[in-house]
């Protein structure tokens, strides 16, 4: 597969893709019309913040499966267009969190101690020690708006300075706030008057742009310091500049801007304002992490796997993903097998999570199973973004169920409705990357499926395998594993499942049918992974 890197990326990320067999082209600085011309050749695309991945580019990407952003913000990618085309959009949200948190602390200390102004004075040959009396962080109140990855790291570091921590984040659980040592408020108007320092770590949304305007500034202490290393525009820049100029706030340190590059701003020329050119993620370590992380995620997407940072599907918390992750591949495998043994196109798919899985959000497992099913019934590329839409087009209704009682620690059962009949398969994933079939048509097994799986149902009795195995041997097909189950049924039927080293052709299956005719063969199914 081919991957286009459209912005400068850390060499470690480029090399990782090449080491894993991908054909990588690095072509930076291309305009939209040029990208539209070349994008049909590529399966994946990686950008940073410079390249705009527009609707025309996405629609021209006939082979495009995934767009990765080596960083956090994805304002430069048309996610709606990508979703319509079934293209995964992902980012590397944790690649720069340490760098961003450290930049926040750097700005906080620099503005509190007037470090930049003092440096400028010294560079001019002056000695103005008394002019640069600063402020300690110790026992000051820091208000943190946004307690996600970066906000949490800032809280940990500020706590080490002996600061009192208060915050606002409607999505932060009480348990996480307690762990961080942050007293969380529901109303920002209660927080602002208490703060000696305010730092924001919020996404750019309609609600957060201009979140701090004239009303909020009027409630601040005149000794407050403001820091922003998150997104430009959260502080109303005109009001901020006015309050800083008039000494109604002690100062501000700003790293991000509504329009970048920023060469003109009402904050320019103010002695009590520090301005830096968006340095939050600008460290060697962060750039290396961003390149490596996005390379990993793009490879997962190109391999049809779950991409944990996909932005155009529901995000799954890391702790939940750790638990359900091994079952994603298992459900994809089960879905592929189920579609091949079904007598007709599925009209419904029921996915039931058993055991410990039943205590978690397992909706992604239903999508994984759908992805496996649909991959057998369409030539379109199927992934976690478009699986549900394709299922709806094919008339497949998905039902997700849970049941805690189970013979295994965890298990997932797929039951498909097709042609007025039902077919079922159940799988476990005791180890990451290992899928084991534990139920097929209601017969109990415990086998790891190979690339070629043959199942046969017949009336149980002596001599059956003696008829089957010679047919496979005469066809030069080696049996790697074999399991037989009678299901404990009173009807006297048995099911045998073979893992074969080679495909079982239609002519061989005809020979198997002929060999077992007198033993009342009830069904024969060949499945490939």
Image (tube, rainbow, N blue to C red):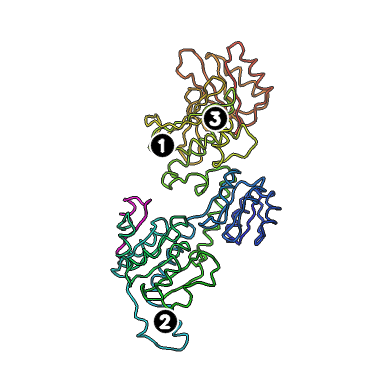
Q: Secondary structure at mark 1?
A: helix
Which segment did they paint magenta?
163-179
Residue ID at (50%, 47%): 308
- Dot 2 or dot 3: first in sequence order is 2
Q: Please state if 219 lies on the left or on the right of 256 as rendered.
A: left
Q: Residue 167 lies in magenta, yes or no?
A: yes
- Quarter-of-image position of residue 380: top right
SS category of the residue bearing label 3: loop
Mark 1 Cα shell of 10 Å, populated few (<14), some (14-19), many (≥20): many
User: What separation in Å lies between label 1 and label 2 (alpha carbons)?
Assistant: 59 Å
Closer mark to the observer between disc 3 and disc 1? 3
Query: Of helix, strand and loop, which one carries label 2?
Result: helix
Residue at horizontal 51 percent and vertical 70 percent from the top: 277
Image location (x, y in percent) of residue 452: 60, 31
Q: Which residue is mark 3?
A: 396
Residue found at the far left of this picture: 139
Residue at 63% across, 54% down = 18
The residue carrying pointer 3 sits among few (fewer than 14), some (14 to 19) or many (20 or more) residues within 10 Å by Cα, namely: many
Residue at image mark 2: 118
Who comes first in sequence, dot 3 or dot 1?
1
Residue 341: x, y in percent? 57, 25
Residue lying farthest to the top in this orientation: 518
Measured in 3D between alpha carbons, the distance from the residue under mark 3 to the one under mark 1, in whole angstroms, is 24 Å
Which residue lies under the disc numbered 1?
A: 357
42 lies above or below 139: above
Tell me which corner region of the image, top left, top right, bottom left or bottom right, holds residue 355.
top left
């Amino acid at each position: 597969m081919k991957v286009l890197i459209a912005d400068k990326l850390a060499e470690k990320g480029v090399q990782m893709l090449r080491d894993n067999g991908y054909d990588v082209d690095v072509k930076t600085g291309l305009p939209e019309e040029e990208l539209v011309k070349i994008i049909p050749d590529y399966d994946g695309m990686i950008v940073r913040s410079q390249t705009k991945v527009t609707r025309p580019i996405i629609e021209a990407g006939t082979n495009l499966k995934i767009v990765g952003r080596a960083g956090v913000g994805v304002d430069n990618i048309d996610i709606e267009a990508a979703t319509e085309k079934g293209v995964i959009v992902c980012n590397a949200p944790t690649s720069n969190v340490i760098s961003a948190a450290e930049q926040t602390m750097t700005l906080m200390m620099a503005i509190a101690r007037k470090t930049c102004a003092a440096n400028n004075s010294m560079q001019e040959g002056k000695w103005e020690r008394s002019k640069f009396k600063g402020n300690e962080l110790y026992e000051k109140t820091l208000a943190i708006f946004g307690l996600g990855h970066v906000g949490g790291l800032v809280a940990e570091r500020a706590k080490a300075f002996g600061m009192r921590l208060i915050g606002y984040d409607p999505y932060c659980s009480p348990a996480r706030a307690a762990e961080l040592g942050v007293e969380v408020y529901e109303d920002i108007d209660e927080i602002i008057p208490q703060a000696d320092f305010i730092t924001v770590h919020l996404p750019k949304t309609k609600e957060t742009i201009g979140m701090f305007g004239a009303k909020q500034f009027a409630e601040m202490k005149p000794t407050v310091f403001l820091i922003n290393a998150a997104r430009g525009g959260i502080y109303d820049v005109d009001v901020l500049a006015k309050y800083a100029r008039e000494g109604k706030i002690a100062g501000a340190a700003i790293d991000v801007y509504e329009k970048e590059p920023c060469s003109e701003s009402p904050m320019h020329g103010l002695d009590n304002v520090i301005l830096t050119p968006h340095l939050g993620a600008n460290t060697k370590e962060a750039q290396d992490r961003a390149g490596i992380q996005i390379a990993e995620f793009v490879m997962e997407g190109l391999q049809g796997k779950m991409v944990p940072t996909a932005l155009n599907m529901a995000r799954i918390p890391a702790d939940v993903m750790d638990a359900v992750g091994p079952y994603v591949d298992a459900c994809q495998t089960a879905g592929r097998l189920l579609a091949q043994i079904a007598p007709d196109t599925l009209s419904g798919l029921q996915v039931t999570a058993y055991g410990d899985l039943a205590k978690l959000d397992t909706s992604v497992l239903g999508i994984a199973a759908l992805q496996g099913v649909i991959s057998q019934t369409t030539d379109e590329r199927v992934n976690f973004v478009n699986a549900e839409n394709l299922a709806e087009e094919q008339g497949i209704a998905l039902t997700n169920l849970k049941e805690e009682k189970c013979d295994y620690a965890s298990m997932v059962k797929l039951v498909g409705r097709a042609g007025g009949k039902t077919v079922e398969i159940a799988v476990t994933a005791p180890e990451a990357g290992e899928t084991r079939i534990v139920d097929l048509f209601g017969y109990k097994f415990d086998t790891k499926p190979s690339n070629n799986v043959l199942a046969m149902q017949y009336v149980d009795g002596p001599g059956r395998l003696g008829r089957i195995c010679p047919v496979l041997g005469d066809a030069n097909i080696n049996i790697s594993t074999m399991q037989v189950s009678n299901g404990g049924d009173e009807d006297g039927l048995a099911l045998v499942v073979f893992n074969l080293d080679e495909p079982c052709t239609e002519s061989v299956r005809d020979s198997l049918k002929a060999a077992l005719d007198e033993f009342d063969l009830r069904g024969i199914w060949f499945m490939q992974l």
